[in-house]
Amino acid sequence: MILKRVLLVVAVLGLIFVAVPRPAHAAPVEDEGADCPISQGTVTANAKLPDPFTRIDGSRITSRSDWRCRRAEIKDQAERYVYGEKPAKPSSVTGTVSRTNITVNVSENGRSASFSAGVDLPSGTGPFPAVVVLGGFGADTAAIKAAGAAVISYDPLAVGREGTPRNNKQGAFYTLYGASSSTGILLAWAWGVSRIIDVLEQSGGSVLRADATGVTGCSRYGKGAFVTGAFDQRIALTMPIESGTGGAPIFRGVNGESGAQPLSSAYGEQPWLGDAFGSYTGNPAALPIDTHEVIGMIAPRGLFIMDNPHIDWLAARSSSVAALGGAEIYRALGASDAISYWSDVSDGTHCATRSEWRAPLQQSIQRFLRGTGSAPAVFRISSQAAGNLAEWRTWQTPTLTAGTASPPPATPPVSPSVSPPVSPP
Ligand code: MCU
């Protein structure tokens, strides 16, 4: 009798667990800090990585809940100095979601544009979580589907073209915001992914879940995936691959890293970064931020950075410093397990499909998009491209008082295994 009851309870809990998996830390809105006050400080040159925990007014944050508005300051600086502005959701976003395709129609101030993306569902019954794959190469789409997530194939070039001069940018983003917008195409690509998520939200979620989205891409699209995850807090899992300069690597590191793509090259090759960044390519010490803090914009959400140490141009050493610095922010937020880094790979081919990354990729999808299992929580830094965080910082990581790093999800987690307590640093 008692056994029957126990079994019944277990079965019911199991059903709830299956029916309501929630991503670990994703937010219900694109920007949770939209209401935060932002002050403009004076920027003093700093050859070392700026202290992520010190506000623009010079005070240090003390609690995990302070990160919401500290993140908003970093976001503002990232827009102002590095990527250009990301406009909020336009006044009209409509579209459709089918089992093979997503369409997106946007309009603002009398200007309209459209773009679409492919959908490739895994086996089983939905609604499915999804990983947006930027560009058509370098992401292990078979592994993504085998882990139970759909693949959304997104062509970023429809939203922000390459090969255009900075004063005549093209693509859906610039149709709305003007060909002379100073926003670089990485953030235009990111804006496009946010509009896809808007359409997922409006679709009712019968094919794809809107609350379980990941993003990935390799090389220039790794830069795009990195920026996309940083600028939309609805994204539960960000997985940049071999992103190189303009992606994960610290700006302060690449000009001095042997063989790495210099900032001036990344700024000039394509209008990836915002126009304002042009003033800093020779003097990144004058930037008030660096990419460890862009990683902090992703925290405490899922992040898996993949790098290739065999090609110097890809700046894996500077990327490892960003990851180590960013991991300090995850640690302070009590979410150390949500960041992983892996550059210890054998095949030197750029954007190869790598067997080493399959397990941690699938574990990340299980944990952050399906709410099962545990995160890979792994740092495998190749000795060929191992940066040393201690050389790059003067600050120490504070012990922040408890308090959620972001407001709790709309529906409270139903099982501890969906959102396990994270131990403090
Ligand atoms: C790593 O990303 C870029 C790199 O920044 C460029 O200099 C090079 O031309 O192309 C890489 C890429 O996107 O390869 C596909």
Image (spheres, grey):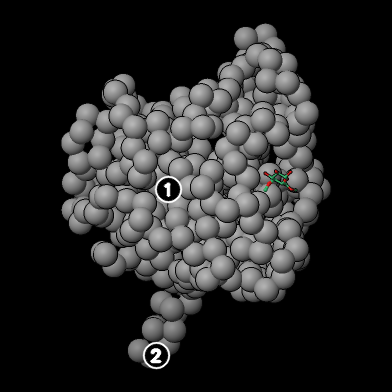
The location of residue 160, given as percent across then percent down, is: 71, 29
Residue at point 64% right, 56% down?
Answer: 312
The location of residue 388, given as percent across then percent down, is: 41, 61
Residue at point 53% right, 27% down?
Answer: 277
Task: Name the amino acid, label 2.
Answer: Leu
Relative placement, left or right, of 365 versus 411 is right
Label 1 and label 2: CA atoms lie apart by 52 Å
The image quarter in which residue 125 lies: bottom right
Number of numbered callouts drawn = 2
Q: Residue furthest top?
A: 110
Residue at point 27% right, 30% down?
Answer: 56
Residue at point 44% right, 84% down?
Answer: 7
Binning the other alpha carbons within 10 Å of mark 2 as few (below 14), some (14 to 19) or many (20 upward) gives few
Find residue 173 and name its label: none
The residue wearing badge 1 is: 292
The residue wearing badge 2 is: 3
